[in-house]
Image (cartoon, helix red, strand yellow):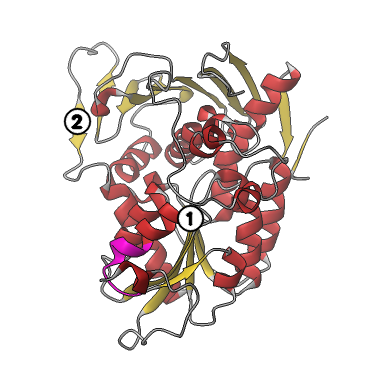
Amino acid sequence: MNRRIFLMGGGAALAAPPGGQLRVGLIGAGGRGRYLAGVFEKDPAVRVVAVCDVYEPNLEKGLSQLGHPAKAYRNYRKLLEDPEIDIVIIATPEHWHHRMLLDALAADKDVYVEKPLCHTPEEGAELVRAARASDRIVQVGMQRRSYDLYLRARDLVQTGRLGAVRMVRSWWLNNRLRRRADRRLEGPLDWDQWQGPAPRRPLDPHRFFNWRAYSDYSGGIVADQGAHVFDAIHLIMQAGFPSAVNASAGQVHTPKVDTPESVVVAAEYDKEDFIAVFTINYAAMKYYYRNDQLNQYDGDKARLDIGREEFAVYDQGAEDKPAVREVSPFPFRHASEVHVADFLESVRTRRRPTAPVELGFQAALVVQLANISLREGRRVRWNAAAMRVEV
């Protein structure tokens, strides 16, 4: 189709999809947002009817990939005003999740929001209250909760197969130091809108393209990836909020940014009687995709090792050969596909989704407490009853 047809911002109403279809609006048409839009449209009863982005090249790409007409928006609040939209996908940088989710709930939309759920503990507590007061369905993008491999691992651990698990050890390795440092804007960007609730800074393409490494917009790589890891630990251990978190970090080696590449986080779970240690090093060598992360559950009878697409159980006294080994028949991207399918089923039936706001906040909170620990140089305690950080 002609590109100009796609870019008619907020024009006349589109022809209605066939009866019973769910209409979706995408907020944030970067790589992850475009991927999710494609996953949503694998369901024949779903159509993405609107795309919003403040960076024109992303807006164009988001509209073009659909293969059918859709409305273009450059302000997410205008998209939320559209009465034809049933669902919104929030796939923006982390610093916008809190405000956008509150506004989407107020606009009576069901929401799929990417992780981490929020930027601070205070934002998370407010979102939990707002979600509980709403009848809307909200799914946080913690896709391991819908993944067959992790669900089977959860069931295995809960049978007592490992014995008492008092420690979980996990790591994620990659390298961000070798990435392209200076990218240029390829089209118009509404910088003021993109900054939103963040501190005002001069226009800086490096901040825009590398926002995950700036504390103004993100909890750093430890939060971006740690939210996934701690959510999986919470799932498999059936754990709730941490009682305390302590963290240590190396120096920052990436030019311009203010978040470290190498961080160790120790989270304590008093109620469940275990600690979870997460080590992230994005200044490491580049590993094969299948080897870049691992979680190890140390029981007093056996150990569970689980990665992206397989897990193995090693019994005490027989560590050289797994007693149990399971490989998912699906690639890791399948986790996102079944997670979206779970959300859509919840929208249709109004049942509780797999990863509601409360669980998304539990995962985000661990890495937020880790960042507070780094800033303040102390072990940070969480008061779950009062939903606040202990001073």
Question: Which quadrant of the figure contains the C terminus?
Answer: top right
Question: From which residue to which does the magenta span run?
Answer: 63-69
Alpha carbon distance from label 1 to label 2: 39 Å
In percent of width and height, residue 35 lies at 33, 53
Residue 27 position within the rendered picture, expressed as x and y whole percent measured from the top left: 50, 60
Residue at 67% from the left image edge and 50% from the top image edge: 196
Instruction: Tell which of 352 and 114 is nearer to you.
Output: 114
Asked whether 204 falls inside the magenta stretch, the response is no
Position of residue 112 relative to residue 327, above or below, is below
Residue at left 31%, top 63%? 64
Residue count near mark 1 (Cα–Cα under 10 Å), binned few <14, some 14–19, many ≥20? many
Residue 252 shows up from this direction: yes
Question: Of the residues under marks 1 and 2, which one precedes in the sequence?
Answer: 1
Report which quarter residue 228 is drawn in: top left
Considering the numbered disc 2 on the image, is that residue within a helix, a strand or a loop? Answer: strand
Amino acid identity at mark 1? Gly
User: Label 1's element?
Assistant: loop
Residue at 65% of width from left, 65% of height from top? 103
Question: 388 or 259: nearer the eye?
Answer: 259
User: Up-down: is 4 above or below 224?
Assistant: below
Q: Is residue 20 above or below residue 375?
A: below
Q: Which residue is mark 1?
A: 28
Q: Which mark is residue 226?
A: none
